[in-house]
Image (cartoon, rainbow, N blue to C red):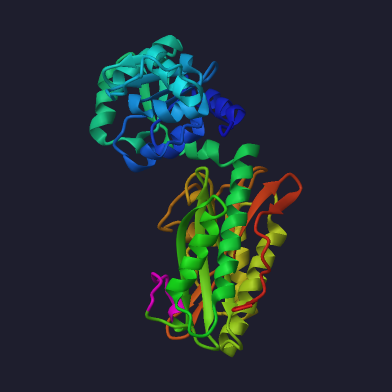
Amino acid sequence: MLLNRERARAMMVQHGLDALVATSAENVTYATGFANWTIYTFRDLEVYGIIPREGPIALVVPIDAADYLAQVLVDVSRLYAYGTFHTTRAPEVTLQGAEAKLFEIREEVSHHPTGVAALSQALTDLEIGGSLGVDERGMPPARWRSLVEAFPRHTLSEAHDFFRAVRMVKTAEEIMRLRTAVQVVEHGMLTAFRRAVAGVTEAELETAFREAVVSRGVMPGHFETSAGTRSAGCFPTTADYHIQPGDIVRSDSGGRFRGYWADTGRTAALGVPPAKLARYYDALHAGITMMLGMAKPGVPVADLYRAAMETVRSAGIPHYQRHHVGHAIGLEFYEAPVLVDASHSGDIHRLGSTETRLEPGMVVNIELPYYELGLGGLQIEDTLVIRPSGYELLTTASRTLLPAGA
């Protein structure tokens, strides 16, 4: 179970909602476990995950999702399908396994001509009336209007931020997936660092990273890894730049395991790095150490931001600026809360409130990158779970300046 049902129920009572309706790919996965690649690719599909305040959860999907659902052995009684997809059965064969389940789903599922009709039947069967919190992010405005027209006896309110608030506190299953993603991505990043010898290109480092991550069952994400003075930018990797002795290699890397993202970063040096960058790295390290020392339930995210900035500036980078010093992570790469204070609430991601306090079960990234064009860049980024008495680190790599090529 990905859904934090207890937290969702308490918040629904608080806000007077009878049910939640997930529509975006991430929220449908969160509500129902349905994570077929189609909903992450065809963003115009109608898919609904219905979470009543009390009672069973239901799922509305296109009929061509039946193949995926047969593999994961869903409860057909709470499945509603719509649309057309043609499959033929060999009459002389006794079906087994997923093929038998697929046939069962196609024969027994509640099938409707449109997604709205299927959603309507699900709400009727679940006896849900009154107020619906509907995730507006997974639909264009025209679809929202069609839902309002289709359900005149319900009150619909926008609920994407509601889902974000529920998802801030992770379940054990979510943390397991995040831990796996972090461990594999970190392994891939360190594999790339070991390949970072003189003459190797950034593109070759990316190949090493992606091969290492894929081989362990994680889908690679971003690999912002540049060397030399190029490390001051988040450039795409290139086959034109060859790593040289004395280069800094800054990596910010990511990947996804069963829907859940990892995002981590470290810095390596091939030989002796520029003295100025080495001093700056020590200042960033001090800032990260300060944040780790503060990380526990009840701490406002704004306090983490201010402490990190003050520490880095006093430790050796007096001009240091940063729009945020971390973010939550989960089904989405950036989730609420973002670690920022009110003076910097214009951060481009704008997730959550600057007054949010850390809670047990939150999974947050803390990060203090530095970019100076003409000199180079630095990266330290860790992932931690907030626990009742402090935190648990999911990242395990040393936060010291790492040796490249070793």
Q: How many marks?
A: 0
Q: Farthest residue in the front direction?
A: 92
- Residue 262: quadrant of the picture: bottom right
The answer, for residue 132, to whether it is visible in the render is yes
Q: Residue furthest right?
A: 389
* Quadrant of the snapshot with the N terminus: top right
Residue 201: % across, % down:
45, 78
Bounds of the magenta segment: 230-239
The quarter of the picture where the C terminus appears is bottom right
Q: Main secondary structure of the magenta part?
A: loop
- Whether residue 324 is visible here, answered yes or no, is no
Residue 88, x across and y down, in percent: 31, 21
The magenta stretch spans residue 302: no
Rendered location of residue 97, percent (x, y): 51, 24
Q: Nearer the viewer, residue 53 or 357?
A: 53
Does residue 232 belong to the magenta stretch? yes
> Of 288 and 117, which appears nearest the observer?
117
Query: In the picture shown, does residue 127 fall above or below 131?
Result: above
Residue visible at 54% across and 89% down in the picture: 245
In the displayed structure, would residue 241 be above or below residue 257?
below
Please identify the quarter of the rendering in which residue 28 is found: top left
43 lies left or right of 184: left
Residue 306 screen position, x and y as percent:
59, 63
> Who is closer to the viewer here, 311 or 119?
119
